[in-house]
Amino acid sequence: MKWWVPAILMYVLICMIGLFLPASEGYDVWSWKLLVVQIYAIPISLFVLAFNYWNYRKKTIR
């Protein structure tokens, strides 16, 4: 189950970066930033998860 750890770390990293980026006036609230950064964090994490799963399966089949 080590193939899912990079996806979780990527999700946390993207969320942390998104929280520290500047935002427009009125949207500079951490909860709003966290909600918006989910639009980027979830697809990227799913891509990393799929890539690692595919790579893991390729190694176990051989």
Image: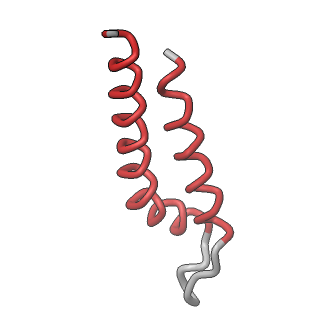
Residue lying at 53% horizontally and 60% vertically, measured from the top left:
34
Circle count: 0
**Residue lying at the far bottom of the rendered structure:** 25
Residue 12, image x and y in percent?
59, 46
In the rendered image, which quarter is residue 21 located in?
Answer: bottom right
Residue 51, image x and y in percent?
37, 36
Q: Where 33 sits versus 1, above or below?
A: below
Apparent side of residue 37 relative to residue 59 in the rendered image (left or right): right
Q: Nearer the viewer, residue 48 or 23?
A: 48
**Residue lying at the far front of the rendered structure:** 62
Residue 59, image x and y in percent?
40, 16
Residue lying at 56% horizontally and 56% vertically, measured from the top left:
14
Residue lying at 56% horizontally and 62% vertically, measured from the top left:
31
In the rendered image, which quarter is residue 38 located in?
Answer: bottom left
In the rendered image, which quarter is residue 23 located in?
Answer: bottom right
Q: Where 57 sits versus 62, above or below?
A: below
Apparent side of residue 44 relative to residue 18 in the rendered image (left or right): left
Residue lying at 59% horizontally and 40% vertically, measured from the top left:
9
